[in-house]
Image (tube, coloured by chain):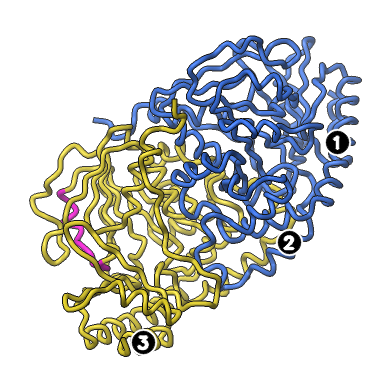
Chain colours: A yellow, B blue
């Protein structure tokens, strides 16, 4: 008999964006921040680099980080659960809410990892298509989900839905705000609902994809249950220190955010001018399509020219390119190369 | 209806050993290494501390680490799966092998986290009592397990079983070798079986509990399935660098191991002299009991005197103290204080 669970055997592995060696490509494929993290992060890490720090287990609940994050967001530190990246947080939520065979609902086109997480859990999985203009369908068409996850801003579209559109969805409702620092609004006010969890990551707006740190915000009674499910020491001592220092430097985050939002406008305008249909973005990437020529060859040509972007093809919707907002120089180069194709 | 899965609602959280602020206690309660990691680890981390490293996602499969570990253990790098601590590896294995309601088997007394992991998965859980002298019962009494986990060396006893005792157990069989570098033998030869997984951690012998890094070794066909279940970026860029540097410095590990083994002898002899029944240990801790007086007050008294040790009480077996092997000075102080009680 196969020792592997049938749901695992049957599923395909999630395929992340390519990660070539540093410096070999202009990397606009995985929504990393083109700017380094705050200098305070590097200082804090330097100070934490002692043998005595490294040899001891970290604080399993990340109290110091949660106090900082609580202050930044105006929430109770006990309303925060720490994770080894927001993927870890989403895994914790899945295992808390979804039994084998339970229903997970997400949107399509959206972040394809949600499907992978459901498959690992042995859950049922249903995708709700976005309505025109990247709105949620009304009335909301699903009942009985064990968990609904909405990326907001959404990937690949970069679009946001309003909290009042989300209000119709039964809990547990997960609002994945990985990209929210690049948007105009967030959904923290939805936390007055006891069945909503908002997730955040340090990988995008704080420029710390390498350290793997994310967190969830929810009612403390829910967070206590998440604490049973998470690995005891799921966040290491260095990532805790880095995450705390990053959140403490909001001014730096806002500065780099402003640069990215400015370059995003240039990228949107440039792509439109080159004949792409561009979806106005609230994130650090831009989703673009075209009806007049196939996109795969553009992807391949750009790769030849040492520029990586991401291609997605969604059943029932079609394909497009998701291009991360890099530095001004990187986006200048991208637009130049696309213009020559 | 309660949105929390019933198995999660019903379970208690795992309670790790206390982690007080650094320097306030002699900490002999969580089997941390009393010595710092290799200086090469700190050098490698220094070199990796750049904004460009931190802002980018890590290598999701940890190839550079796996090549080093493959060389050290004489195995195929594709036979290795990386984890955010060996707890993460054990979680990955559980989710790969054990469906809801499937049976997980472990020994008792052993590492109580195995029960927690089973509860999170919604699995059935059966504990097999050790036979006299910390041997496995023969014949092995369970059939039909979805996964059997044996800590070897075992915690809290510090004892080892032989590979030939393990041979009787049906797969999937997980041999948790967290403490094996302090023992005389390991079970890597059991990997000729395609249904055995050996897990390792950097938290004990390499003095890196703070960075959260562990790995599993198994047939590459199994490792491919684990790769579907693990979070894409489950190990951060700094822990990957630290783990690789640590494994590359085997001489340093052997040096600190020798110190710990020497101090362990002193601890065993000292405790015996003070009237404890001591189980000869193959790990970096010592399990001791006594019939003539209760142990809880000893624990409490030691805490008053700023020394933390771990107390366990197992149903059907009884209680004992598990004392981590600290430095010579720390163990000298412990024996002195116990002598005064």
Q: Residue at x 82, y 16 (%)?
A: B277
Which of discs 3 and 2 lies nearer the camera? The answer is 3
Disc with the residue nearer the chain's start (1 vs 2): 2
Badge 3 and badge 1 in a common chain:
no
Q: Nearer the viewer, residue B290 or B237?
A: B237
Task: Identify the subunit bearing mark 3.
Answer: A
Task: Identify the subunit bearing mark 1.
Answer: B
In the picture, which quadrant includes the N terminus of chain A? top left
Callouts 3 and 1 close, C-beta under 8 Å: no
Q: Is residue B179 shown left or right of residue A82?
A: right
For the magenta stretch, what is the residue range? Answer: A157-168
The residue to which callout 3 is attached is A337
Badge 1 and badge 2 in a common chain:
yes
Residue B214 has which mark? none
Q: Is residue A161 magenta?
A: yes
The residue to which callout 1 is attached is B261
* B143 up-or-down from A73: above or below: above
By secondary structure, the bulk of the magenta-drawn segment is best described as loop
Q: Where does the image place residue A267, in percent across and percent down from the top left?
A: 31, 83
């Amino acid at each position: 008999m196969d020792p592997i669970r049938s749901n695992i055997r049957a599923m395909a592995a999630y395929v992340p964006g390519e990660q070539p060696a540093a410096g070999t490509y202009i990397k606009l494929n995985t929504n990393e921040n083109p700017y380094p993290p705050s200098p305070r992060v590097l200082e804090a890490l330097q100070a934490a680099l002692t043998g005595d720090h490294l040899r001891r287990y970290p604080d399993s609940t990340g109290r110091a980080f949660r106090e900082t994050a609580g202050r930044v967001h105006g929430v109770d530190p006990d309303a925060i659960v720490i994770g080894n990246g927001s993927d870890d947080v989403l895994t914790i939520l899945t295992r808390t809410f979804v039994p084998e065979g339970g229903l997970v609902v997400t949107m399509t086109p959206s972040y394809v990892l949600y499907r992978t997480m459901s498959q690992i859990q042995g859950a049922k999985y249903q995708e709700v298509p976005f309505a025109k203009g990247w709105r949620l369908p009304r009335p909301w068409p699903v009942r009985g989900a064990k968990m609904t996850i909405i990326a907001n801003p959404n990937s690949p579209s970069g679009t946001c839905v309003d909290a009042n559109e989300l209000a119709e969805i039964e809990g547990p409702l997960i609002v994945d705000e990985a990209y929210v620092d690049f948007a105009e609004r967030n959904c923290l006010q939805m936390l007055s609902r006891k069945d909503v969890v908002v997730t955040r990551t340090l990988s995008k707006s704080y420029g710390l994809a390498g350290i793997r740190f994310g967190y969830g915000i929810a009612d403390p009674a829910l967070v206590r249950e998440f604490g049973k499910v998470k690995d005891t020491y799921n966040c290491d001592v260095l990532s805790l220190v880095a995450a705390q220092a990053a959140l403490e430097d909001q001014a730096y985050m806002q500065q780099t955010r402003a640069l990215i939002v400015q370059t995003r406008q240039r990228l949107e305008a440039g792509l439109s001018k080159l004949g792409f249909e561009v979806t106005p973005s609230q994130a650090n990437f831009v989703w673009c399509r075209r009806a007049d020529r196939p996109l795969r060859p553009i992807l391949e040509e750009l790769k030849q020219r040492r520029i990586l972007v991401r291609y997605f093809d969604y059943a029932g919707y079609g394909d497009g390119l998701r291009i991360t907002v890099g530095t001004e120089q990187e986006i200048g180069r991208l637009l130049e190369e696309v213009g020559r194709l």
